[in-house]
Every structure is written in structure tokens, then in C-alpha cells.
Amino acid sequence: MKRLERKRARRCILLAAASVLSLMSAFISGDISSLWFAGSFGVCVVCAILAGSERMSELRCPYCGKGMAPVRWKPGRQQVRCPGCSQLLLYDDEEPAEK
């Protein structure tokens, strides 16, 4: 059975958090000069693009390549099936639930 890598899902979560935190840093510091804001906005955009491209390229269905797995930090109770081929989308640290 083909599996998705959990480290890639965690990397997506960390990049999305870095995107939000980089933009918030300009407002939290109180110094909203144009250079500081442009730099933090640039980091925000780069992190968001990296997170999106990681999810689009590495967290697709390993069978058909159409569906995308939900990004989860740790194993969840609910198992998700691909909408394209109806295969289970499992990470490398999950086991299929017995019926």
C-alpha cells in the first residue's frame, strides 16, 4: 500500500504558520516602516507559495494523483478516501481501520 509522508504535511503546517507570523511581526513590533512591512510581506508570500506547492505536489493521492490528503500534524481517527479513485489516503504512520 502506498503511503504519504507525514513530514511533508508537518512542513506545510509550519510554512503556513511562518507565513502568518511573518506578517504579524510587522504589526507586533510597532515599527511599520515601508521597508520592514515590504520585507515581512515578501516572506509571507514566499512561505505561502512554498506551503501551497508542497501540498499540491507531495500530498496528492499516490494512486491517481487527483485528490489531496488533509494536512494533519498527527494521526487522526477519521480516514479519508480519494474522491477520484476511492483509495484510502494514509500517511506513513497510520494503519487502515478494520471494519
Image: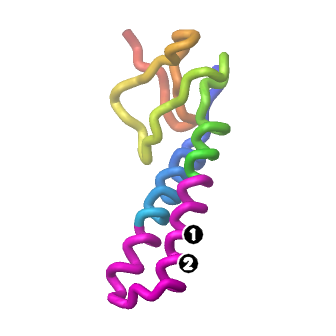
How far from the left and from the top, in percent, is residue 23?
Answer: 43, 70
Above-or-below relation of 60 to 55: above
Helix, strand or loop for the magenta stretch, by majority: helix
Disc marking residue 39: 2
Above-or-below relation of 82 to 37: above
| Residue visible at 32% across and 81% down in the picture | 28
Above-or-below relation of 20 to 72: below
Instruction: Give yes or no for contact between labels 1 and 2 (Cβ–Cβ under 8 Å).
Output: yes
Query: What segment carries the magenta color?
Result: 21-50
| Residue visible at 52% across and 28% down in the picture | 90
Label 1 element class: helix
| Residue visible at 43% across and 47% down in the picture | 73
- Tell me: 76 left or right of 57: left
Residue at mark 1 to residue at mark 2: CA–CA distance: 5 Å
Q: Amino acid at mark 1?
A: Gly
Q: Residues within 10 Å of mark 2 (few under 14, many from 20)?
A: some
Q: Foreground: 12 or 76?
A: 12
Quarter placement of the C terminus: top left
Instruction: Identify the residue position indicated by label 1 in the image.
Output: 42
| Residue visible at 40% across and 14% down in the picture | 98
Q: Amino acid at mark 2?
A: Gly
How far from the left and from the top, in percent, is residue 49?
Answer: 59, 53
How far from the left and from the top, in percent, is residue 54?
Answer: 62, 46
Q: Is residue 66 magenta?
A: no
